[in-house]
Image (tube, helix red, strand yellow):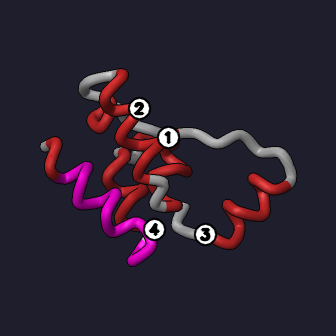
Amino acid sequence: MGRREIALFLLEKGARMDIFAAAMLGKLDIVKAACAAFPGLQNVPGPHKIPLVAHARKGGAAAGDTLRFLESLG
């Protein structure tokens, strides 16, 4: 979690993208679409019970817009 280079490497090797990786990588379009399709998704605990907003925080500056979006949802 929060290791962008490792996440990108794994995705290049065929790992599946999920909403938590998308949040950490700052893929705002994916996160917005998923949250629109599934209201309340921002509150669903992810791997190791870590919330989606924490994944966005770990993304640093690259995930800043995603973090602000998730925080706006409450």
Report the residue marked by disc 1: 19
* Residue plotted at (42% across, 56% down): 55
Q: x, y (%) of residue 66?
A: 34, 57
Label 1 near label 2: C-beta < 8 Å? yes
Q: Which of the two labelled residues, at mark 4 and mark 3, occupies the earlier sequence position?
A: 3
Q: x, y (%) of residue 65?
A: 31, 63
Report the residue marked by disc 3: 4
Q: Residues within 10 Å of mark 4 (few under 14, many from 20)?
A: many
Residue 56 higher or lower than 5, as above or below: above
Disc 2 residue type (three-letter): Ala
Q: Over which residues does the magenta segment extend?
A: 60-71
Q: Which of the two labelled residues, at mark 2 and mark 4, occupies the earlier sequence position?
A: 2
Disc 1 residue type (three-letter): Ile
Q: Main secondary structure of the magenta part?
A: helix
Question: Between residues 65 and 8, which one lies in front from this camera angle?
Answer: 65
In the rendered image, which quarter contains the C terminus?
Answer: top left
